[in-house]
Image (tube, grey):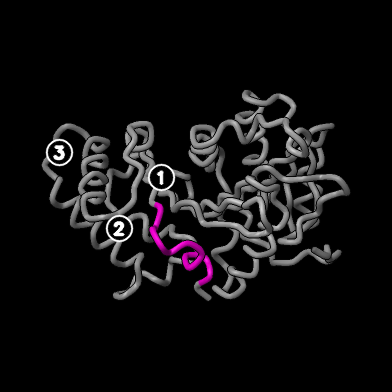
Amino acid sequence: MPRSLKPLGQPTRGKTASNRLRRVDNFILLYEPSLLTRTDGPFADSLFVDLGYGFDPRTTMEAARRFRRLNPNLKILGVEIDHERVEAASPYRDEKTFFRLGGFNLPLQTGEHIRLLRAFNVLRQYEEKQFARAYETLVTYLLPDGLMIEGTSNPFGSVWCANLVRREKSANWRFEALVFSTNFRLGFDPAEFQTVLPKNLIHRVVPGEPIHEFFESWKRSAAETASVKTYGVRQWFAAAAERLAERGYDLSLQRKWLSRGYLLWKPTGLGKTFIHTG
């Protein structure tokens, strides 16, 4: 696709906290570690891209430390639409770590490819139609089988929700899962996740919408299993997920997810409609 020289998008507030995206990175490491270590074809030299890292690149550099434990040679690109933020990141540049001015039209150089794209706390400020267009633009930069995780967290990253999108071998892409995450420091209440829903869903929690029905079912499931919380919040979270699955929702009930505070929902039959809501 043609690459525009002018960055597409607008600056975020730019504020963040150390380790705000630690649980996002840990999720990726648990979900598909092979994505970070692939060396076949164009994956051999491909990038992890952190879009919209903020006033300083702390979350980008934290991701670099985590991901490079698995792949010491992983190349990482931080992208910001604000000149001052790119300049502020310049001391952290090296032969494997880059910071460039750009927007949704990512500033890739000739021959560069992306295996993983993280865009957190970036797209919530846009209108739904802009959100959908941003997705169509961003996914084109991913390698086939590449992954984009896009979502929103609370200020400290203890609760977040994200869309997980896969670039297919064709030019198409598919919605893979909606991921909910909590470290249980705020306890457990399904309603907490409504405040951090991605832009395509945040205004859709109204009667008649699938995401509204999901939350109503999750709240009922949590209420029905409330007695389990005497054994701990994690046990309650898992029990509520199992009850929710009994209601017909396609959830991953593996202990490696539930015990760590991750709930993965694959909305059957909805696919791209979870993204193309504008």
Counting residues from the N terminus, which is met first, the one under dot 2 or under dot 1?
1
Specify few, some or many for label 3: CA neighbours under 10 Å numbering under 14, 14-19, or 20 or more.
some
In this view of the protein, which residue sits in the foreground, 188 or 258? 258
Q: Which residue is mark 3?
A: 228
Give the extent of the magenta segment. 266-276
Horizontal and vertical percent position of residue 50: 67, 46
Q: Is residue 257 magenta?
A: no
Q: Quadrant of residue 204?
A: bottom left
Residue at screen point 33% across, 51% down = 250
Q: Secondary structure at mark 3?
A: helix
From the viewer's perspective, is residue 125 above or below residue 225?
A: below
Horizontal and vertical percent position of residue 271: 47, 62
Answer left or right for 86 relative to 251.
right
The main secondary structure of the magenta stretch is loop
Horizontal and vertical percent position of residue 125: 57, 67
Count numbered badges in the picture: 3
* Cα distance between the residues tagged 2 and 1: 13 Å
Q: Which residue is mark 2?
A: 191
Q: Amino acid at mark 3?
A: Val
Q: Amino acid at mark 1?
A: Ser
Q: Is residue 271 magenta?
A: yes
Residue at screen point 69% across, 45% down = 49
Residue at screen point 81% across, 36% down = 93
Whether label 3 touches label 1, CB < 8 Å: no
The N terminus lies in which quarter of the figure? bottom right
Q: Amino acid at mark 2?
A: Ala
Q: Residue furthest right?
A: 110
Q: Which residue is mark 1?
A: 181
* Cα distance between the residues tagged 2 and 3: 19 Å
